[in-house]
Image (cartoon, rainbow, N blue to C red):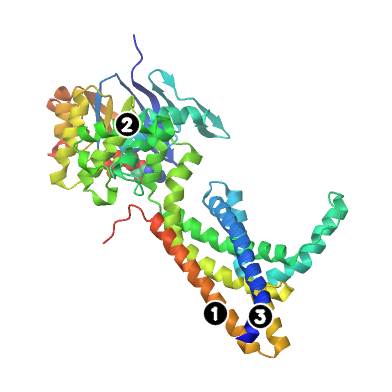
Amino acid sequence: MTDPALRVENIRKSFGDHEVLKGISMTAEKGDVVAILGASGSGKSTFLRCINLLETPTDGTVWLKGEEMRMTSHRGERRPVDHRQVERMRSKLAMVFQGFNLWSHMTVMENIIEGPVHVLGTPRREARDKAAALLAKVGLSDRAEYYPAHLSGGQQQRVAIARALAMEPDVMLFDEPTSALDPELVGEVLAVMRALADEGRTMLVVTHEMAFARDVSSKTVFLNKGEICEQGAPADLFRNPQTEQFQAFLSRMN
Amino acid sequence: MDLLLEYREQLLAGLVTTVQLALASLVLSVTMGLLGAWAKLSASRAANAVAGAYTTVVRGVPDLVLIMLVFFGGQVTVNRIGAATGLWNYVEISQFAAGALTIGIIFGAYFTETFRGAILAIPRGQIEAGISTGMSGPLLFRRIIWPQMVRYALPGFGNNWLVQLKTTALVSVIGLQDLVYNAFAAGRSTGALFTFMAAAFVIYLALTAVSDLGLRALERRYSRGVARA
Ligand SMILES: Nc1ncnc2c1ncn2[C@@H]1O[C@H](COP(=O)(O)OP(=O)(O)OP(=O)(O)O)[C@@H](O)[C@H]1O
Ligand SMILES: [Mg+2]
């Protein structure tokens, strides 16, 4: 048996005495698309951010392709044992943000080759060729020399996805990638994400797009108040919600 | 005019000293400013406290008092420490060193605030994007934080620098032969104080104009990607 692409075990996170995540465990096999649903404040973003250590979880363990992110306690504070391991694992866990977060002082091309060249050490020429192919894939070949400020939100998000892909990640983390977009721009980003799912990328997608969760995900997880309330194949889950909370959530979304 | 020509070497020497002093203290103050901003933004309480004390004290005391304190008090203190510990023999702090040190430290406090504000102005998400790409701290600073920080810091930096340049004139009080000192000396010995002070006036204006050009070039260079309306 091969190791799952991503496994998390008992992730907890508190801010002060407010416990936002109350022990979340899940596994994503290679090629899985996990849709993560939940009301605002249920801890979806915090969960994704604990996986790549943008937030340090109060407890719990993350494995990427079987490699454990090693943590230790120092005077009551948890922290990673080896920051180089964290950096290496982060480079294989690409994140796509709600607000795009492109580097505004770099062109589209520079944004995409930045990680490969400076973090992975890819030769610039090779990185540029690959970036050009990725831009073609997200439909933005003619925008390579633009700065982010001169692109629409949908275009910026597609660049951000290309930037994430350039790292050749093992797992991609999406935090509401379409929530900041005008309605008419949502489709172009979802189309790119569907294509990624079709080619077998492993993805965790926090989203409010029910159709995407239902049609594209291989597994849907419903978070409620920092706990997994329901999870399973989307077909079952959407047809047959087991809990009141999920029923209420679904009726609010429709 | 003839008078000015006659004293041109003295004026020129003063100008060179002023520029050297301004640049030396600029290097020090930018370094102090970066350290101070880092300390103020760091998670360490101790670093916060030290940086807070530094900016509060320096900004609350007149520049002239600090300059004289360092020049007259500094030398005594340094030599007392040297004698007590036996680590060094008698050292003499030159007027240039005392001036550069003090002005550097004073303006380091102002640069601390400028740089702190500039770092805070960088959208947090862009820093998180760097972190989640796997960038190490130094790489993140060099590639993401520094270029954007410079852009946000430039207006404040320009102001600080112009004030700092003018503040170097204070060291004539401790006898450093800068532009003001030499112009004043020449004016007094020739009885043409007005002529020489007018010359100093024009030279300072010229320095300011040159600075402005430099600052504008920097601004162009670091405003890459800024949406223009
Ligand atoms: N840095 C922080 N400090 C303190 N509290 C925080 C912090 N980040 C998140 N929280 C709190 O944690 C809870 C979960 O936040 P989170 O952003 O993970 O929710 P979410 O499910 O992503 O919501 P949304 O759908 O609005 O994005 C919220 O109550 C929030 O206020
Ligand atoms: Mg969120």
Ligand 1 falls in quadrant: top left
Quadrant assignment, res B70:
bottom right
Q: Are marks 1 and 2 in contact (CB under 8 Å)?
A: no
Mark 2 belongs to which amino acid? Ala
Q: Chain of mark 1?
A: B
Whole-Å distance between the Cαs marked 1 and 3? 12 Å
Q: Is residue B102 left or right of residue A217?
A: right
Q: Please check whether the numbered discs 2 and 3 fall on a single chain.
A: no
Which residue is under mark 1? B202
Q: Is residue A229 above or below residue B148?
A: above
Q: Chain of mark 2?
A: A
Whole-Å distance between the Cαs marked 2 and 3? 62 Å
Which residue is under mark 2? A166
**Secondary structure category for the residue under label 1:** helix
Mark 1 vs mark 2: give the one in front. 1
Quadrant assignment, res A44:
top left
Mark 3 neighbour class, 10 Å CA radius: few under 14, some 14 to 19, many 20 or more? many
Quadrant (top left, top right, bottom left, bottom right) of the C terminus of chain A? top left
Which residue shows up at 38% across the image and 38% down it? A114
Q: Which mark is residue B183?
A: 3
Mark 3 belongs to which amino acid? Ala
Q: Is residue B10 left or right of residue B124?
A: right
Which residue shows up at 60% across the image and 79% down it? B200
Which residue shows up at 70% across the image and 88% down it? B190
Residue A216 x %, y %: 17, 27
Q: Which mark is residue B107?
A: none
